[in-house]
Amino acid sequence: MDSKLKEINKSKSFWSGPLTIWENIGEHYYLIANFIQRDLRLKYRNSILGYFWSLLEPLMLSGVYFVLFVIIRGSPEPNYPLWVIIGVICWGHFSQSLNGSITSLTDNSGLIKQVYFPREIFAITKVGSSLVIASLGLLVSIPLMYVLNIQPNENLLMVPLGLIMICMLSLGVGLLLACLNAVNRDIEHFFRFVTRAGFFLSPIMWTIEMVPASLEKYIMANPMVVPITMIRNGIDGRSLGIDDIFVAYSSLFCIISFLFGCMVFKHYESRAVKKL
Amino acid sequence: MSETVIEVEEVSLQFPKTRVTLGTVESSLMKLVKFGKTQEDFFVALNGINLKINEGEILGIIGRNGSGKSTLLRTISGIYRPDKGCIRSKGQITLLAGLGIGFNVNLSGRENVYLYGSILGNSNKVMTELMDSIINFSGLNGFIDQPLRTYSAGMRARLGFSIASAVKPDILLIDEVLSVGDQEFRKKSMDRILEIVKGSKTVVIVSHNFTIMEQLCTRLVMIDQGKIISNGNPADVIAEYSRKVN
């Protein structure tokens, strides 16, 4: 025991948020690991297919979208089913991470009021476990790549980059809104709608090639377009095919929302806890 | 010898008063109409608390329901940040409140030991080392690999206490959980607390059970309406409490 008394729960400057969160992750990584393990174990408990559900779910969903697409637009390209599957998995990852982070304080109010540990861990856990599920889901593309005769190439490196961007974006926006949601639950209801509507505004059932040039810059305002296309084209063995300016915009959007989310969360956390 | 390990200095804490609004159409409309117009009321939970706790002490906190006892413990453990004043401490602090909070009923007892252990700030390695002693102490040998939903409330509480006390924090804060389990287990947990204290560790207890408090504590503090109104010898403080209540 060191001999000096230390002030507990000291308030820190607004800008130190990301650093504090980084330190807390280092100190509590085993807690994060245990929480993620718990989430995964419980998700598919008492089911015969277990983890296979994380493969089957996007597979069946894409079947539905495939049929829809054929009805609306006629016969698509041969690789279309693969694109939809990847899109569905990516969007699932995003919406689960985002909605899970937004409700991370309100869902765990019981625990928060009885034990102290850094509260951002709840959101980080949600993002972490949905990342694991998404990665497992993406494995389904391996047999499909074989069937569609796609040779993996260096574009595959875009896949982890895209996943990291989705994690940063959802965690950032989630942390930004988590405290607000503790005060006002309207946030979570509104964002559940946003993630549903966003599904159609993101390249899941469609690809950027199908978008008319005049609409491109509006579509690109959605920061999810670049990461989804990165993951999809990466697996499909094609280059990104998006202007650098849009890639830079999306990357900056993800990084800034992540850093800003961390700052806001750490700043308002103690006030939000009192409202739980 | 007796160093100060916790120093509570002029700590005040207030909560915004929130009226219960059920999700009815009527209450939602009322909220919309009043949006931004309502002035927030505050409930003062702690009002300028000053307290020094020394190493090796067993400090008891008594007071009526809603007087701020639990809030004080939570503030010391870091759950709430004081609005005014500050709290300084040294060493690992563990708050034992609502045993089994953080448990998951669908995981086995053993898995919950790791989970609860890490919630209290301990790595899986530490928990593996402590596993045998936790199982033995809780007396749940035959049940430890069963899912927690098959446990009775008492068994869950026993497991919770066994984990939290096995970890041996420098400072143990106990909120109203002494009377868990059956007679035999209560005796065991009393002994465990005495053992923790003997290792020159510090314990702070909130309880309404004066018999236990008088036996166990070296000092008592009485809180009323967020203020410390009495501080001293257990017998004296309890006598003052009963005088005040009657």
Image (spheres, coloured by chain):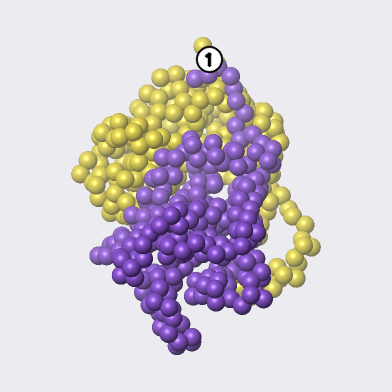
Chain colours: A purple, B yellow
Residue occupying the point 58% across, 72% down: A201
Dot 1 falls on a residue whose secondary structure is: loop
Image: A235 above or below A30: below
Q: Residue A123: percent from the left, percent from the top?
A: 52, 51
Q: Residue at x 39, y 77 (%)?
A: A78
Residue A153's x, y, as percent?
A: 40, 57
Look at the image and tell me whether residue A104 can be seen.
Answer: no
Label 1: how many residues lie within 10 Å, few (<14), some (14-19) or many (20+)? few
Q: Which of the 4 quarters of the picture holds residue B63?
A: top right
Please say whether residue A267 is visible from this viewpoint: yes
Q: Residue at position x 27%, y 37% from top?
A: B135
Residue A36: image location, x then y, percent: 40, 50
Percent of width and height locating residue A35: 41, 48
**For mark 1, what is the residue?**
B2
Q: Can you name the residue that lies furthest to the right here?
A: B37
The chain containing the residue under callout 1 comes to: B
Locate the C terminus of chain B and report the quarter of the image it occupies.
Answer: top right
Q: From this view, report whether residue A15 is shown above or below residue B50.
A: below
Side of A40 relative to A175 (left or right) = left
Q: Residue furthest top?
A: B1
At 50% across and 49% down in the image, what residue appears?
Answer: A124
- A227, B217: nearer the viewer: A227
Mark 1: which amino acid? Ser
Q: Nearer the viewer, residue B232 or A91?
A: A91
Which quarter of the figure has residue B123?
Answer: top left
Q: Is residue A252 above or below residue A88?
A: above
Total number of numbered discs in the rendering = 1
Nearer to me, B37 or B215: B37
